[in-house]
Amino acid sequence: MLNLFQHLIKEISCDALKQVQGDRKRLFQQPDSRRGGSQQNPLSSTYLLPTEQGIALVIALMISLAVMVLIISTLYFVTQSASMSGAGKRYATASEAADGAVEVMKDAVNLILAGEPVNSLPIADNDPPCLLNAVFSDDQSCTTTLTLPGTVGDFNASIVIMRLYSSPIPGGRIEFARAGGGAPTTAIYYRINTIVTGKGGTRAETSALYQYSG
């Protein structure tokens, strides 16, 4: 009787062990469509549950979205850097054009006070003309225009000149000593404001104080 009981327990244990091994094999079993059956490869095959496949898809989509955002951000920063670099170059060119317009107005003042015409200069006087009055009369302003050609487009300059005052030059030093036909004894001061506009809304402004003592 005892032997029979032990034999039954052994058979039940064997059946349970076989059932567990069979369940484990089914978990690692991968179908082989080419052979019409299934092939066991417990080392290289992994059984994925439907929920695990959904999680993998979500992770792949999140990684793709992160990569796309990174690429878009990189392109945006590159574009903005190029735009800022171009704007800086245009402003530097406009600033140099404003300085050049101031020099042209200085030449115009020198020619007018020397009694020579200013037709050789590319300055367009106002209508009615006011440049002569601004050069010879105190507190008289005049606005003139000037077009400066450039490689990226023309620059338009608006130049405002005003005669502030005249002052005698001190003669304490030998270079200012008064002599017939020698060094001048009076200096005339002018304020020259220049606003230059160019392509792409580029704008530069320069203000200068010019002393004429020729």
Image: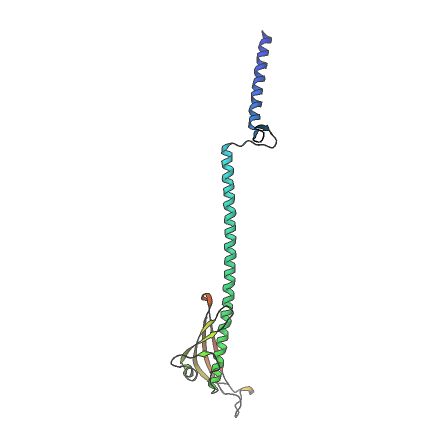
Residue with the most extreme left position: 128
Residue at figure coordinates x 51%, y 55% from the top left: 77
Residue at figure coordinates x 58%, y 9% from the top left: 4
Residue toward you, 18 or 100: 18
x, y percentage for residue 177? 53, 89
x, y percentage for residue 81? 52, 59
Rendered view: 190 above or below 90: below
Q: Does 103 sit left or right of 14 as displayed?
A: left
Residue with the most extreme top position: 1
Q: Does 103 sit left or right of 3 as displayed?
A: left
Residue toward you, 52 or 112: 52
Q: Quadrant of the N terminus?
A: top right
Residue at figure coordinates x 52%, y 60% from the top left: 82
Residue with the most extreme bottom position: 180
x, y percentage for residue 169? 50, 85
Rendered view: 194 above or below 166: above
x, y percentage for residue 103? 50, 77
Q: Is residue 166 visible?
A: yes
Rendered view: 20 above or below 214: above
Q: How many marks?
A: 0
Occupied quadrant, residue 35: top right
